[in-house]
Image (cartoon, rainbow, N blue to C red):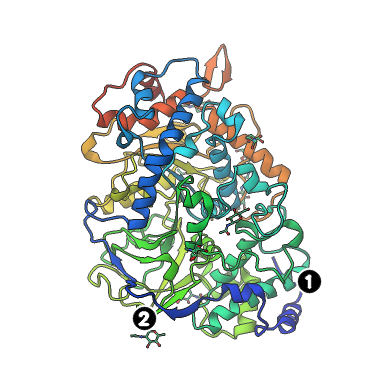
Amino acid sequence: MRYRSIALLSYFLTLHGAAAQSAAAIAYAPTLQPCPVGTTLVREVGVDAHTQPLSFHEADYVSERRSRILPGAWAKYLRNVQANIPAVLPQYVDAILLGSFGKDAFPTLGIATSGGGHRAAIFGAGVLNALDGRNKTSVRAGTGGLLQTATYLSGLSGGSWLVASLAQADFPPLPDLVFGPADADGRGFGGWITQIDVLQPGDAIVTAAFVGELIEEVALKRAAGFPLTITDVWGRALARHFVNGTTASDLLDPALPHGAGTTMSSIANVSTFAARTQPFPIFVTDSLTSRTQGAVVTEPGNAVPLNSPIYEFNVFEMGSFDPMLGAFTPTKFLGSPNESVCATGFDQVSFIEGMSSDLFNEFNVSADALAASSIGPIITALQTLFSQAGIRLDAAEVPNPFFGVSSATFPDSDQKLLALVDGGEDGEVTPFQPLLVKARGVDTVVAIDAVRDLPADTVENWTNGSSLIATQHRIGLFPSSYSFPPVPSSATTFVAKNLTRRPTFFGCNSPPSRGDPLVIYLANGGPPLGEPPLTNTSTSQLQYPPEQVQAMLNEVFDIATQGIPIRTHGAEAKDPLWPACLACAVVDRSRRALGIARSGVCNTCLERYCWS
Ligand SMILES: *[C@@H]1O[C@H](CO)[C@@H](O)[C@H](O)[C@H]1NC(C)=O
Ligand SMILES: *[C@@H]1O[C@H](CO)[C@@H](O)[C@H](O)[C@H]1NC(C)=O
Ligand SMILES: *[C@@H]1O[C@H](CO)[C@@H](O)[C@H](O)[C@H]1NC(C)=O
Ligand SMILES: *[C@@H]1O[C@H](CO)[C@@H](O)[C@H](O)[C@H]1NC(C)=O
Ligand SMILES: *[C@@H]1O[C@H](CO)[C@@H](O)[C@H](O)[C@H]1NC(C)=O
Ligand SMILES: *[C@@H]1O[C@H](CO)[C@@H](O)[C@H](O)[C@H]1NC(C)=O
Ligand SMILES: *[C@@H]1O[C@H](CO)[C@@H](O)[C@H](O)[C@H]1NC(C)=O
Ligand SMILES: *[C@@H]1O[C@H](CO)[C@@H](O)[C@H](O)[C@H]1NC(C)=O
Ligand SMILES: *[C@@H]1O[C@H](CO)[C@@H](O)[C@H](O)[C@H]1NC(C)=O
C-alpha cells in the first residue's frame, strides 16, 4: 500500500499532535508505582524439565478446572460421540471419560492453533467451532464438546489473534467471536470486523488519519520512558479487530479507547476465566538474540534459529521453560525497571497480539525493503514524528526481566531489552512448545496447521508439514527437556502420503519412556471432499468480506469432521467412524497409563489414522 502523499500524513500528525492525549493514548501508556511489598520479578524454574514448577496460579487454575469443570465436560463430549457414531466404543473409553478411574486418568488435552495471518485465524476458528459443544451442528457431527475438555489453548501469530480475542471476549461461541454478537455495543467484543482492512481502513485520506491516530495512541508510552517500536503501532491496528471495544461503525472514531488498557493480566477477571470454564490460553513469540550459543541451527528459509529461546505469555506469567533460560516474570508487571518500582499496563493484549505476529524483521534486509513492505507507511510516519530517534522498526522491545539471569546459557542475559518477533519465525508455525513442557503433563495435542507465511509451504498456499518437521528438529536440540512423537522427516512424504489432507495421528505406538504426547494433526493441506479450494488464501490478504469468512468456516467444518473419506463404488464420503476415532485418540494415553489394551473400534481406528 502506498500513500499518495506523505505530506498529507504529516498534516494529520500535526493536527492531532503527539501531545494530544486521547483516551486510548492514556490507557495504552504503562504507569510506574511502588511494587507491592514482597514482589519478586523473577521466578527461576531451573533447567531440569522434570522438576520445573508451574506458577502457583496456573497450577491452581488447572487443578480447579480438572476437579470442577472437566468431569462434566468429558461426560458431555462422550455422549455427543456415542450418539453420533455407527459403532460402540470400547468400554475403557467410557470408563476413562466418565471418571471411573478418577480425575487423574482424564486426558490432559492441549489445542495448538497456528500462525498464517487471517487465513490461520479463520481456519483455527473453524476447527474450534467444529469441536465446540455449544454448536448443535458440531454436536451432531460427533466432534462437538472436545473444545470444552481442553486444558490448554495455545496460539501464535494469526492463531494468537484467535486465542487472545476469544479469551478476553469471555469465550463466546466462535461465530459470535468472528462476526460479533447481534447486540455488539462498542464496549464488549464487536467481532473481527474482517471486512475492514487492518492497515488501510479507507481511502488515502481516511488511512492517513487512521495511521496518525495509531501513532498518537502509542506516543505516551514512549514519553513515559518505555521502548516504543513498530509492534506497538501494529498492535493498535490489530486491537480494532481482536480486542474488545470496537464495532464496524465506530472503528475510525478517534475518541474511543479501542481496547487500549485491556491487559493480558486483566483476563484473570473475565468471568469464564475466573470460573475456569475456558481452556488456559498461552501465546508464543520468538526472539532475536544478541548472541548465539554455539552453532546457529536455522531451518532453511527461516529467520530465527531453532536454538533461540521461545517465550510464552500467559495471564499470569511471561518467560521461557527453555533450558537456556528457565525463568518467568509476572505478566502484570512486565516492563518494570526493578523490584522497587513496578510498571503496570505494559502487558496490553494488543501489544502481545502484535509481537506474536511481528514478521517485519523479515523485511529488514535493507532500509528500502523495509519501507516497501506493507508496514512501510507506518514506518514513514513513525520516522516523521519521532525523527529516527532510535525506534526499532522491525521487532518488539520488552525491558529484559531476565537481565543477569542464567548468564552462562541465556544469550540475552546482558541485554537491557529483549527483541521479540512472530512466534513462527523459527519454522514452527504450530505453537507446540508450551504444550511440550513436562510440568504441564499434556498427553494429547490437537495441532492445527493453517500454513506458515512468507512464503507459504506450497506455491498454492497449502501446508506441507514443514512446521512439524521444524518442531521435531528443535526437540532434537533439547532432548532432555521436551519429547515429540516421530513425524516424517521430509515435507515430500507429508504431501505424498496425504498427511496434510486428512487428520493424522502421530505417536500412537510410542513407548511410555519416550514421554511424548499423542498428536492429532489437522492441517490446511487441501479442500475437503468435493469442494472448491477456499481456505488457501494469501497471507497478504488483510481484509475479508463476511461471506468469504463464512464460506471458509463452513469448509473448515468439513475438513475437521470428514476424517479420511471412505471410498465405496467409486464414490467418496465422510468417514462415519471419524468421531469415534477422534475419541479413541484422545483417550489413548490415559488407556496406556492404565495398562489397558486397545480394543474394538479403537483398534481399527488407530490403524487407519496413525502414521506408523
Ligand atoms: C470483553 O467483552 C465481553 C463482552 O463482550 C466481556 O464479557 C469481557 O469481560 C470483556 N473483557 C475484558 C477484558 O474486559
Ligand atoms: C480484578 O478486579 C479486581 C476488582 O475490580 C481488581 O482489584 C483487580 O486488580 C483485577 N485484577 C486484575 C488482574 O486485573
Ligand atoms: C528502580 O527504577 C526507578 C525508575 O527507573 C529508579 O528511579 C530507581 O532508582 C530504581 N531503584 C533501584 C533500587 O534500582
Ligand atoms: C534491522 O536489524 C538490525 C539487526 O538486528 C537492528 O539493529 C536494526 O535496528 C533493524 N532495523 C530497523 C530499522 O529496525
Ligand atoms: C515445504 O515448506 C517449506 C517451508 O515453507 C519449504 O522450505 C520446503 O521447500 C517445502 N518442501 C516441499 C517438499 O514442498
Ligand atoms: C488455492 O489452491 C488451488 C488449488 O490447489 C489453486 O488453484 C489456487 O491458485 C490456490 N489459491 C491461492 C490464493 O493460493
Ligand atoms: C491422496 O489423495 C488423493 C486425492 O484424494 C488420492 O487420489 C490419492 O490416492 C491419495 N494418496 C494416498 C497415498 O493415499
Ligand atoms: C500464494 O500467496 C502468495 C502471497 O502470500 C501470492 O503471492 C500467490 O500468488 C499465492 N499463490 C497462488 C497460486 O495464488
Ligand atoms: C455451527 O457451525 C456451523 C458450521 O460452521 C455454522 O454454519 C453454524 O452457524 C454454527 N451454529 C451456531 C449456532 O453457531
Q: How many marks?
A: 2
Q: Is residue 594 visible?
A: yes
Residue annotated with mark 1: 205
Label 2 residue SS: loop
- Above or below, 597 against 533 in this view is above
Lateral position of residue 407 relative to residue 12, left or right: left
Whether tag 2 and tag 1 are in contact, CB under 8 A, the answer is no
Lateral position of residue 264 relative to residue 507, left or right: right
User: What's the CA distance linking mark 2 and mark 1?
Assistant: 46 Å
Can you tell which mark lies on residue 340? 2
Image quadrant containing the C terminus: top left
**Category of crowding for the residue at label 2, using alpha-carbon neighbours closer than 10 angstroms: few (below 14), some (14–19), many (at least 20):** some
Q: Quadrant of residue 204?
A: bottom right
Which residue is rendered at x = 31% and y = 34% of the image? 105
- Above or below, 326 against 462 in this view is below
Image spot of residue 565 (x, y percent): 53, 23
Q: Is residue 610 visible?
A: no
- Above or below, 451 against 561 in this view is below
Label 1 residue SS: helix
Image spot of residue 302 (x, y percent): 43, 58
Instruction: Mark 2 and ligand 3: say if the CB distance to the nearest ligand atom is below 8 Å.
Output: yes
Can you tell which mark lies on residue 311? none
Which residue is rendered at x = 36% and y = 67% of the image? 329
Of residues 423 and 235, the one nearer the viewer is: 235
Q: Amino acid at mark 2?
A: Ser
Image quadrant containing the N terminus: bottom right
Of residues 606 and 262, the one nearer the viewer is: 262
Q: Amino acid at mark 1?
A: Ile
Of residues 457 and 544, the one nearer the viewer is: 544
Which residue is rendered at x = 51% and y = 49% of the image? 272
Image spot of residue 170 (x, y percent): 56, 51
- Above or below, 386 against 247 in this view is below
